[in-house]
Amino acid sequence: MQRDLLSSRPALLAVYFTCPEPEDTQVYETFYGVKPVLGAVSNKAILNRAAVMAPLSQGNALALKAAEEQCAALLDRHQSRAGLAAKVRDHLVRSGPPMPGMDAVASALCMTPRTTRRRFLEDGTSFLKMRDETRLAPGPKAPLSGLALSVEQIESRVGAP
């Protein structure tokens, strides 16, 4: 994919893997375009910032505009949450990983799970949608914002198995 998108400028400067070094690393070098460091402390890739941030040669202004509009609509919807949804989101953000279930959130808001479920239905959403939205949401209060996390920590925070 790197070759397709960034054909004239390599984006990958170095790649590190925690796995032990095999006898032949040629497969890695051919695939990544750089000699990998195997047996490293952590898995990581070092990218050429200029190459990654440069406009794509095959970029499409219409596709960019559509993506920006979708992001803006998502942010508007996310930030416009009020009432119960806002309270639930705040509780989920404050509780951190692992995120609590609906029974625990309902109890914290002095409601029964049945009432909470009914109120979500009235608002046209559900607890699961709110929890997923909170896990993956951008923004200053989001669980993943502004943190230097490992892949394992991110998996834990977003609820990956």
Image: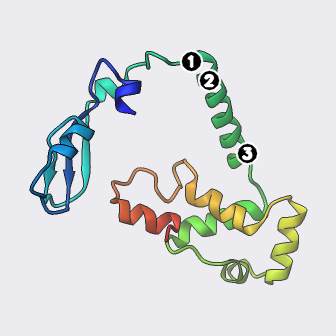
* Residue 87 seen in this snapshot: no
- Residues at marks 1 and 2 touching, judged by CB atoms closer than 8 Å: yes
Q: Dot 1 lies on which element?
A: loop
Is 99 left, or right, of 18 in this rendering?
right
Q: How far is mark 1 from mark 3, CA to CA?
A: 26 Å
**Amino acid type shown at disc 3:** Arg
Q: In which quarter of the image is residue 13?
A: top left
Q: Is residue 20 left or right of residue 110?
A: left
Residue 119 visible in the snapshot? yes
In-image side of 144 versus 54 (left or right): right
Name the element at disc 2: helix
Question: Where residue 158 sits in the image (x, y, percent)?
Answer: 51, 63
The quarter of the displayed image where residue 77 is located: top right
Q: What residue type is labelled 2?
A: Ala
Viewer-side residue, 133 vs 95: 133
**Which of disc 3 and disc 2 is earlier in sequence?**
2
| Residue found at x 51% / y 49% | 140
- Image quadrant of residue 50? top left
Label 3 sits on residue: 77
Measure the alpha-carbon separation of dots 2 and 3: 21 Å
Q: Which colour scheme is used?
A: rainbow
Q: Which of marks 1 and 3 is in front?
A: 1
Disc 1 residue type (three-letter) = Asn
Q: What residue is disc 2 on?
A: 63
Q: Horizontal and vertical percent for residue 155?
A: 44, 64
Proximity of marks 2 and 3: CB atoms separated by less than 8 Å: no
Q: Residue 60 carries which label?
A: 1
Graded by Cα atoms within 10 Å as few (under 14), some (14 to 19) or many (20 or more), the crowding at tag 3 reads few
Compared across the picture, whether 48 is left or right of 154 comes to left
